[in-house]
Image (tube, grey):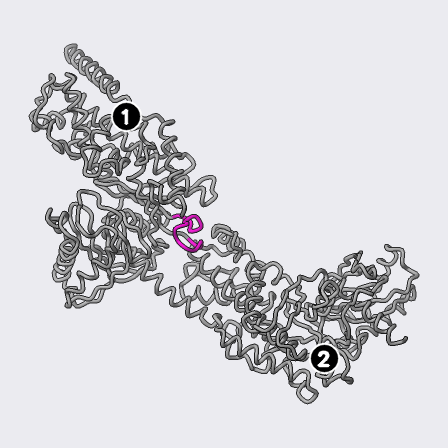
Amino acid sequence: MFAIHLLAFHFTKLKEDQIKKVDRYLYHMRLSDDALLDVMACFQAEMVKGLGRDTNPTATVKMLPTFVRSLPDGSENGEFLAVDVGGSQFRAHQVKVFDDGKQSSQLESKFYPTPKEVIQGNGAELFDYVVDCLVDFMETKNLKHKKLPLGFTFSFPCRQTKLEEGFLLGWTKHFKVRGVQDTDVVSSLRKALKKHKDIDLDVLALVNDTVGTMMTCGYDDPRCEVGLIIGTGTNACYMEDMRHIDLVEGDEGRMCINTEWGAFGDDGALDDLRTEFDRELDLGSLNPGKQLFEKMISSLYLGELVRLILLKMTKEGLLFNGKVSTALLTKGKIEMKHVCAMEKYKEGLSNTKEILTELNLFPSEEDCIAVQHVCTIVSFRSANLCAAALAAILTRLRENKKLLRMRTTVGIDGGLYKTHPQYAKRLHKVVRRLVPNCDVRFVLSQSGSGKGAAMVTAVGYRLAAQRKQIDAALAPFLLSLDTLREVKQKMRTELEYGLKRETQASASVKMLPTYVCGMPDGTEKGKFLALDLGGTNFRVLLVKIRSGRRSVQMYNKIFAIPLEIMQGTGEELFDHIVQCIADFLEYMGLKGARLPLGFTFSFPCRQASIDKGTLVGWTKGFKATDCEGEDVVDMLREAIKRRNEFDLDIVAVVNDTVGTMMTCGYEDPNCEIGLIAGTGSNVCYMEDMKNIEIVEGNEGKMCINTEWGGFGDNGCIDNIRTKYDKEVDEGSLNPGKQRYEKMTSGMYLGEIVRQILIDLTKQGLLFRGQISESLRKRSIFETKFLSQIESDRLALLQVRLILQQLGLDSTCEDSIIVKEVCGAVSRRAAQLCGAGLAAIVEKKRENQGVERLQTTVGVDGTLYKLHPHFSRVLQETVKELAPQCDVTFMLSEDGSGKGAALITAVAKRLHNVGQK
């Protein structure tokens, strides 16, 4: 018993001594965590460099866009072929994907040899051989009669310009085929396929084996967004935000990036970590100075690295009694399979002794221990370096998502990872140590390169079908130039109908006279009161205008209007308004002054003079009784009399659109048009009196409030109304009315978007086909969300957050579609608004009888001011449709307050001139 313990002690001591000896000898191969963190930081910097357009040419990590924009979502369906070129064998695959809710698939494969004369011959021979293998496979599976989509796995660095096009950058893995570099490999495959008239295949996708690995695992695990190969070669891919990829146009969504990380360090960045053995191995390779990272970690080189270390140790008398065998002198004699077998610790030293004996090395026990530890250090360094680069990718993913902690999955394939007894465990452990804020799951890919190519093809097939459906839904919102010209012409016709006495009653654009007959000329002066009633709040303003200097000072106070007042009697409403005026006058110390007053009353009124306005009907939640059909100015005067505290000179009742025009006209004499593009939509402009048949007199001008929101109520624009517009109209408070406004104003755009989203969800194109309760709620999609979602500065992650606030659980792809829908709806609104405005400016030009008109449009409204693209599209449309008009757009400052005071001031000035 004592002898056994002594023997065990002797062996343990012997083992420790040998391990220490090897540790000292290979000290530089043992990497600390600090060294790995440096590698990680260096790799992150190279990734950024590779993604930049200007820095990519000098980057060692090329970060190649793959044009794979989406991961599988489980709805893929169909039968696909895949051919796999790049490994030790060619492979052909048949993949069936079932949309059965279980994400089921079937894979059948056949393997073909890779003759040396083919992989080191010319391009035509290579692709002819690949197609011959594919034809043989199709005959075996009785598939020649079928037209099938084909995915092409080509495991070499390619610069892709689209999913089905890629130019070979250079051969690796002992391939040296002439005439292929810098050519499109998909074109070469198609050319070879055309020689076989009896088959009909459509090459839909070119896929790198790393991407195939990610897609295969992504089909089973939706969290998988990283692919890793550790085998004969090594590489990684991951899903990058488009906004960071300078090499591809567009910033929406994500795209898979093939890092081609094997070349990391080719610029010398890893020189401090490379040993004399790495340098010797590199010098003896087919591509000296290239793929240096790959040469430190892939199975193709690790066996050779072990051989070089053992050779030097033997020459120095540290192994095999200093006897150098032929095996140690023969390149490639020690392979990765030997390294894997020797590191099976559970089998002790038996494997190591057997392998070394086969190599005629006749090892002692000490030799076996030392050789086993050399293998351990070499493979451990490989796992460490791989973990550092992978940790850099995971950190970038987490930072892209702006998460403190991230859960994700890495799909892995490759012989080294699969067959080495310790590699996977070591890799996992180091990754988790380097990125403690990432919860990483590692999933082994099953037939990644073949099934993955089919999955990329299946996803591409699905996206193409979805694209057709989305395009069909949004096609009616894409208005051609001819359609917009037609809208402009119809608007012009309706404007004329509204101005003529015999057609005004039936016109959809009512062209209401405002009795505002002049614009500010700079001589206006004095103190004026302005009232602004148009919503749940009511404003009273004191406006001081100084003559000559175009200077305006304003003081205002906001008062709430309780619901019981809004929906009570007319007398109660106007008594409340007068109470607010009294409070304001007292607050400003003006109780005794009889000031001229302008009343902005933003409800439809028919005016008989500048100070007479008959309410046509309440909107915006007001329902006060005994008001409709009454003159609102008279009702205000009567309420002032009832209070009997002060008197006011009510000079003008004002529409907010006219106020907008007057405010801008005060600053710019060229401004004779006012536009509101906000919750509602309307335009006013100065019309020649001779053209206004419904008002007596032919001299001068008068501002016309077009009330163009009703354009189309007679059916004249039904040809451009979509089914979504009709649904919004039918669900509104006033079906059949204000149809143009319902296509162009902020109050309705969000509701149009909601109707489209419901339709796309029913078709299974959004939100996993599930219509949430929140999406069923009318008006949940406010127009402010359109402005936010369409903002160029907003990343898709933030779009998803907005949708989550609305109770819509969206994927990245959902967010892209929602953004596209919002863009289509708001762009059409801006174009329609622009077409209507073009009709107005053209009319102004013809009125003035000039070849070219220079005019200014005063604009107000949240849609115009806050939406990121509305104003630009509107202006572009006006320019396109009214090329003889130079239109300047000027933002209004408080049209309903300041504008009302200016209208009052102009009216007083003109009244005084008339009296004189």
Q: Left or right? Give the position of 846 relative to 68.
A: right
- Indicate which disc residue 29 carries: 1
- Tag 2 secondary structure: strand
Give the image quarter of residue 27. Answer: top left
Task: Please state the extent of the stretch shown in magenta in the rendering.
Answer: 240-253
Name the residue furthest bottom. Answer: 502
> Visible in this render: residue 709?
no
Q: Secondary structure at mark 1?
A: helix
Residue type of the residue flagged with mark 1 = Met
Near mark 1 (Cα within 10 A), the count class, few <14, some 14-19 or many ≥20, is: some
Where residue 378 sits, quadrant-wise, is top left
Q: Which residue is mark 2?
A: 688
Q: Is residue 348 above or below residue 797?
A: above
Image quadrant in which the N terminus is located:
top left
Residue 26 appearing in the image? yes
Q: As displayed, is residue 422 above or below residue 826?
A: above
Circle 2 packing at 10 Å, graded few (<14), some (14-19), many (20+), is some
Residue pictured at 17% horizontal, 52% vertical: 91
* Residue 94, horizontal then vertical, whole percent: 20, 58
